[in-house]
Amino acid sequence: MNLLKKKIFNVLILLFFVISCASDDGEKVTIEMIEKDLYDQAQSRLKTGNYAAAILSLEALEKQFPFGKYAEQAQSELIFAYYKSSSFEAAISAADRFISLHPRHPNTPYAFYLKGLAKFTDDQTFFGDLPFLGDMTYKRDLSKAKESFDDLSEFLTRYPESEYAGNARQRMIFLRNLIAKQEIYIAEYYIERKAYVAAINRANYIIQHMSKTPEVLKALEISIIAYNELGKEDLAQEAEEVLKAYKEKI
């Protein structure tokens, strides 16, 4: 919906509520009544999962009553509605705006949380039915995954006691493992191309920064291969000892 259509729609919504709010006994319609009815309409649409329609109501509410009683709540709920309707870029923008305008609002932690989710759910399979992910996922562009990891990390740093903290941690574990798999995939590619120094750098990154992922074993194995190919038997031996110690712990 372009800007002109949105403006026309907002005007039509207001006209609708002016007419529908008029009581049978001729009670005067007030701005507060229109605002309340528009908010109630948005809530009804959110509850029934009609997120596209809810977005229209919330956008109209925010546009026509920017300093009204429900303005902040509408801004917050727009983030959720955008996210649920798969309008992820809009959700990110709405979250950034809400965080900037209301840094101490009770819903700000949720805005941070949804921002992190939206960065990586342009494909619903990632954070939807995780058990059904294909084995090739780690070969995709994971730049959004890394941004999502950083955003969720910031969320947990700011709000470690949030009700969404546990869910955020689980998603970060998934993301971290996925990113580690991609690093292994690249390191193995370097081994095939005999680019052993590059392979070691990738493997060391996993060992140093992703030590809690299952890919650490593969990273150590890659290091051993690369060091031996480079004639660095002493470093290969050290990596073998670390690998042995690591296996004994698991």
Image (cartoon, grey):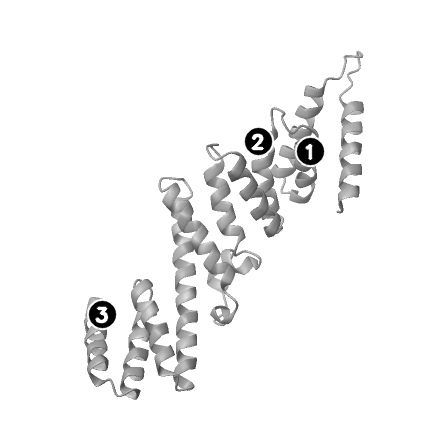
- Left or right: residue 125 compared with residue 14: left
What residue appears at the point 26 percent right and 88 percent down from the top-left corner?
A: 231
Please rate how many residues cluster around mark 1, counting C-alpha atoms within 10 Å: few if below 14, some from 14 to 19, many from 20: few
Which residue carries the number 2 mark?
72
Which residue carries the number 3 mark?
246
Q: Earlier in the sequence, mark 1 or mark 2?
A: 1
Per the model, the C-alpha gap separating discs 3 and 1 is 58 Å
| Res. 177 image quadrant | bottom left
Q: Nearer the viewer, mark 3 or mark 1?
A: 1
How far across and how far down the image is residue 125, in percent?
Answer: 54, 60
- Left or right: residue 186 compared with residue 210: right
How far across and how far down the image is residue 157, in percent?
Answer: 37, 45
Identify which residue, 88 or 195, lies in the foreground: 195
Please rate how many residues cluster around mark 2, counting C-alpha atoms within 10 Å: few if below 14, some from 14 to 19, many from 20: some
What residue appears at the point 43 percent right and 54 percent down from the top-left corner?
A: 150
- Using the image, determine if residue 104 lies above or below residue 170: above
| Amino acid on which disc 1 is placed | Lys
Label drawn at residue 242: none
Residue 206 visible in the displayed image:
yes
| Amino acid on which disc 3 is placed | Tyr
Which residue carries the number 1 mark?
63
What residue appears at the point 76 percent right and 32 percent down from the top-left corner?
A: 13
| Res. 213 image quadrant | bottom left
What residue appears at the point 38 percent right and 78 percent down from the top-left corner?
A: 198
Instruction: Name the image quarter holding the C terminus.
Output: bottom left
Q: Earlier in the sequence, mark 3 or mark 2?
A: 2
